[in-house]
Image (spheres, helix red, strand yellow):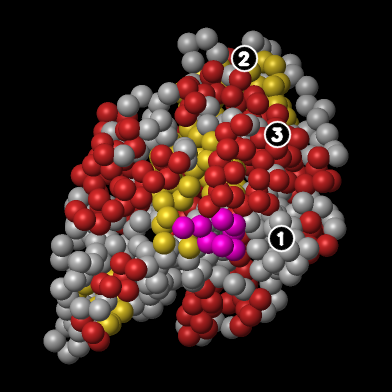
Amino acid sequence: MKMNDWKKKAIVYEAYVQSFNDSDGDGIGDLPGLIEKLDYIKNLGANVIWLTPIFKSPLVDNGYDIADYEAINPIYGSMNDFKKLLQQAHERDLKIVMDLVVNHTSDQHKWFKESKKNRNNKYSDYYIWRDPKEDGSAPTNLGSAFGGSAWTYVPERNQYYLHLFAKQQPDLNWDNPQVRNDIYQMMKFWLDMGVDGFRMDSISFISKPSKFEDAPLEDNKEYGAYYYGSANGPHIHEYLREMNQKVLSKYDVISIGETPHTTAREARLFVEPDRHELDMVFQFEHMHVDYGEFGRYSDVTFKMSDLRNSMTSWQNDLSWNSNYLGNHDQPRIVSRFGNDSKYRKESAKMLAMVSLLQKGTPFIFQGEEIGMTNLHIKNIDELKDLEAHNIYSFLKSKGISDKDALKMVNRKTRDNARTPMQWNKEQNAGFSSGNPWIEVNPNYLEINVKKDLQDSNSIYRFYQKLLKLRNNNQVLLDGNYDLITPEDSAIFAYTRSSDKDKVAVICSFVPYKVKYELPEDFVNKNKVILSNYDDREDMASNTIYLRPYEGVVIKRE
Ligand code: ISL
């Protein structure tokens, strides 16, 4: 399974559908709204759209709790709207990738409704059921990703079921061949319709240990780490190879596994081509550079060198990566890794350069291309995300003040990424004529698509140039990645090189001017091919000065 040309040139735009564009004024983004914006995505330079879940769901976890895999949630539109989306996207050479959420279902899925009734029906063994301990308590101390125990008791069966996420998201039992078969059939249902691939949610968790054990307590938590024993379980690769053989290999599609808690060594087993499993994975190591005593929600600022080391080690370890800094679970990248006040434009452009020109597939999360920023809420009641609410109560229980707990939640709440796309400075940022399901970031008057489209120097225009450059330069597609000047405290610089060409990407992460010594083989032999300051000239001397958050891409002449 060698990566073919279209996959190498894939540039993925993640559309968080409910926050993208609302066509009918109910305050929720929808499929017809997305169709209206296909040209916008195409013009940016993306050629694949990944849709977050649009299936029937009670929306406890914004659609990652699916009640029917083969039905579209009416709040997003109809099956006809989806078919229209596929057709209109394909007419524009845009591919559509769906979210495949098969580590768990919603507790409203018919499989679970049956499964919880008793121990001897067709679906009894579709989920992970375990007996209570002798005293009636949960089988182990395992905690869920969103807080609380990962086990919930069901009296009808006198058993607990496992849910690594919310209790309304019971984990499927992949050891049951019937479950796997039903999932494969469902995948074929979408692929036969013309869907071009899947982003596989939490896929590193699908194979569970046969025996659950108590897990170590981390991050001041009361429950054991949810991923202990559950990530990369004993049959994970057997199941993915089976899925590849029975489904994926029969279609020309792209597969991206989301693999939390997976080391590079383990990740290789998912993606190296001779393994016949997946095309690429989303790894998380570089998302942990600002974790601390309360895990993700700690009040810690990242160190550039940690980000650089982590990204570099993955570049070195895998032959192909998925390159992302943000998504619908993460803060806005310009607020987290850049500077969302004085140098918003410069740093947003620089972050695109530093991450999307590495070897692998570029992923752009909606709004990154206009430099959207975090939302700074003043009261916890303003938040939608269940994870943030649970964490807020937890932090307070640890004696942290309201003010500090709010600050910690503000840094990382998933709502930061989920505020509506800012299209223009009209009502609700042009997202909806109704009342948006989640607050619009008040900075939409300043930060919006319309404004960026009118400005030849905007972040959007820069993304266009960058993506074109990436897909038109073979060295940026295939060239080797090598970190250069690894000791520099302000600058993240690397080269991409092939037999013929060599390109250096040099990016400053600081809000002041810094000096940089060009690598010798570029001195007097370079041409600037991309820069986030429009007056950057080719460099005649070996010493250059980079301005705040300046990034420059040079080609060896
Ligand atoms: O976001 C996280 C904390 O950094 C991760 O642990 C996250 O929970 C993990 O990446 C899985 O995320 C995916 O599955 C979840 C869903 O809530 C997320 O939106 C989804 O991206 C459960 O389906």
Query: Which residues, given as a range, are shown in magenta?
Result: 71-78
Residue 216, given in percent of the width and then of the height, sits at 28, 69
Q: Which label was assigned to residue 556?
A: 2
Tell me which numbered mark, 3 or 1, is placed earlier along the sequence: 1
The crowding category of the residue bearing disc 1, from other C-alpha atoms within 10 Å (few below 14, some 14 to 19, many at least 20), is: some
Residue 119 at least partly seen: yes
Left or right? Give the position of 290 relative to 66.
right
Q: Residues within 10 Å of mark 3 (few under 14, many from 20)?
A: few
> Would you say residue 487 is visible in this rendering?
no
Tell which tag, 2 or 3, sits nearer the viewer.
3
Callout 2: 10 Å neighbours few (<14), some, many (20+)? Answer: some
Report the mark closest to the observer, 3 or 1: 1
Q: CA distance from mark 2 to mark 3?
A: 29 Å
- Circle 1 residue: 24
345 within the magenta span: no
Q: Amino acid at mark 2?
A: Arg
Q: Which residue is mark 3?
A: 43
- SS at mark 1 in the image: loop
